[in-house]
């Protein structure tokens, strides 16, 4: 027997989904009073059959769904439609939810469901504390630095495991009502936006700081709710692009340094004072899984090398133009462009390291062996202990910025100087946040420039010391995570 064909509609992100039907797709959310359906599904008669003989059943429906209903879609005469602004606090209703709504049009339904859940839980009656919640753990990206910076500004902080944040939010809100929720790269926020809307309904300020390529992060999100989230990015290139894709509040927040880790008192790592040093991985963890199904052809590699030889860095913007990629969300297509960019970045780093001279020391993973078999390769180091010492003790530290961030910076642009070292970085427009007179001898535009740049620095020790001192004073004064917190609070207030 052939199964009946389900109605298919486009969800809020423009992707087609089927509409399941049947009584099992209606969930009783409880409450007392008049019946209120949150969505009727593809066959409203099935909703009516749940309450035979009931008069004046109320319902709310997503307008985007109603517009897509085909001929024959009939709402029973005893159903009374309510607009969201007519529903009040929902305390006078027994609520029935058409459960597929949560994945079809979450940005329409989740605010309403959050209002219901927060109202029933009585959370708004709690006293708010000067606390920030940060999803992650003690080893998560930037979490320790942010916690220390918030503490210095008089906040208490709570680091919450991301899964617990999503699964136990009501319980967490019962124990404490924070002032602020800060997520790095959307950690702790679910794909549909339920966590965000619950936090917002509870009166908590929510912000996301995206420190990686924003569209790589957003490629895993299926709902348009991300457009509502106040978002800051480390690379200002993405601000107009995110706004074009519907983001309502986007700001620029570059990285910084933590002076408790990187500071003038750092003890230099021994026997590196004459070495050119690079600390970094050949690839990021789980790279193959993230870019599964993506390709980088021989032709792509040739284009990359030709472009580099012409003194241009093939970054994310360059590859998006080459691929004709105009829409970066929704969908996974952006990852294919990102993979080409990532592979171009690997070639950029290899060529840079190959041009760094014979006195090169690399602290990184074993993946470098296949690209630089003759290099002095040493194991990865701990960020909080050995790394500051290496930056302080290295003769010259190299930085190659990921082309996934066309105008981005890295932690090295701040940490090396703060520790009293000397940084030679590839140039990106993101360096414009620093005074131009400090950049001339500390940047290179192509790998081929490196031998001359390194030789000049080594041949001018007094200039090197002076530059290092000026950079250190600047970074410690203006580019710490304490300053980041000030900018963040100003952005969300």
Image (cartoon, rainbow, N blue to C red):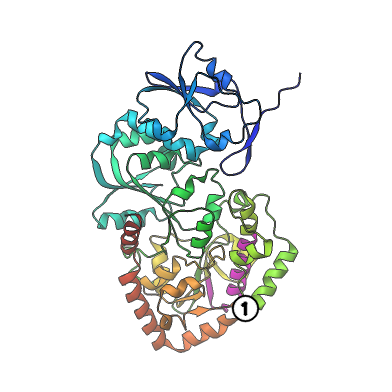
Whether residue 213 is visible here, answered yes or no, is no
- Quadrant of the image containing the N terminus: top right
Magenta region's main secondary structure?
Answer: helix
* Image location of residue 493, percent across then percent down: 31, 55
* Image location of residue 320, percent across then percent down: 63, 62
The residue located at (34%, 36%) in the rendering is 172
Task: Name the foreground residue: 468 vs 374.
Answer: 468
The residue located at (61%, 70%) in the rendering is 348
Q: Which residue is mark 1?
A: 311
Which quarter of the picture shows residue 264? Answer: bottom left
The residue located at (36%, 84%) in the rendering is 466
Q: Farthest residue in the right direction?
A: 1
Give yes or no for residue 354 being in the magenta stretch.
yes
**Region rendered in magenta:** 340-361
* Image location of residue 98, percent across then percent down: 52, 26
Q: Farthest residue in the front direction?
A: 77
Whether residue 62 is visible here, answered yes or no, is yes
320 relative to 132 in the view: left or right:
right
* Image location of residue 106, percent across then percent down: 50, 38
């Amino acid at each position: 027997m052939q199964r009946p064909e389900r109605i298919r509609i486009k969800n809020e992100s423009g992707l087609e989904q089927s509409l399941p039907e049947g009584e099992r797709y209606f969930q009783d959310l409880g409450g007392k009073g008049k019946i209120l359906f949150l969505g009727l599904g593809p066959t409203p008669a099935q909703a009516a059959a749940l309450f035979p003989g009931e008069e004046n059943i109320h319902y709310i429906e997503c307008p985007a769904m109603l517009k897509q209903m085909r001929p024959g879609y009939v709402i029973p005469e005893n159903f009374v439609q309510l607009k969201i602004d007519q529903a009040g606090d929902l305390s006078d209703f027994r609520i029935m939810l058409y459960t597929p709504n949560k994945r079809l049009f979450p940005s329409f339904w989740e605010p309403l469901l959050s209002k219901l859940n927060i109202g029933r839980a009585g959370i708004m009656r709690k006293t708010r504390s000067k606390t920030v919640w940060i999803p992650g753990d003690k080893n998560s990206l930037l979490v320790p630095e942010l916690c220390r910076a918030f503490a210095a500004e008089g906040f208490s902080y709570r680091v919450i495991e991301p899964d617990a944040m999503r699964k136990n939010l009501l319980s967490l809100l019962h124990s404490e009502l924070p002032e602020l929720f800060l997520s790095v790269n959307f950690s702790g926020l679910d794909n549909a936006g339920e966590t965000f809307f619950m936090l917002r309904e509870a009166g908590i300020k929510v912000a996301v700081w995206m420190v990686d390529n924003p569209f790589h992060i957003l490629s895993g999100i299926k709902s348009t709710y991300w457009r509502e989230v106040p978002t800051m990015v480390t690379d200002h290139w993405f601000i107009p692009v995110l706004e074009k894709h519907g983001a309502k509040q986007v700001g620029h927040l570059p990285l910084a340094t933590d002076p408790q880790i990187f500071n003038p008192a750092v003890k230099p790592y021994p026997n590196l004072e004459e070495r050119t040093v690079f600390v970094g991985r050949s690839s990021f963890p789980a790279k193959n899984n993230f870019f599964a199904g993506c390709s980088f052809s021989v032709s792509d590699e040739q284009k990359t090398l030709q472009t580099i030889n012409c003194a241009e860095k093939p970054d994310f913007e360059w590859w998006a133009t080459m691929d004709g990629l105009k829409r970066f969300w929704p969908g996974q297509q952006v990852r294919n462009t990102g993979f080409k960019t990532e592979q171009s970045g690997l070639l950029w780093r290899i060529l840079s390291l190959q041009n760094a001279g014979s006195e090169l020391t690399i602290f990184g993973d074993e993946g470098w062996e296949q690209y630089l078999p003759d290099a002095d390769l040493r194991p990865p180091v701990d960020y909080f202990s050995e790394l500051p010492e290496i930056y302080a003790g290295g003769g010259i530290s190299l930085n190659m910025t990921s082309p996934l961030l066309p105008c981005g910076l890295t932690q090295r642009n701040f940490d090396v100087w703060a520790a009293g070292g000397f940084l030679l970085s590839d140039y990106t427009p993101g360096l414009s946040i620093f005074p131009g007179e400090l950049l001339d001898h500390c940047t290179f535009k192509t790998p081929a420039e490196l031998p001359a740049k390194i030789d000049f620095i080594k041949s001018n020790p007094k200039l090197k010391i002076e530059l290092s001192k000026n950079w250190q004073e600047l970074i410690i004064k203006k580019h710490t995570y304490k300053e980041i917190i000030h900018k963040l609070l100003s952005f969300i207030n």
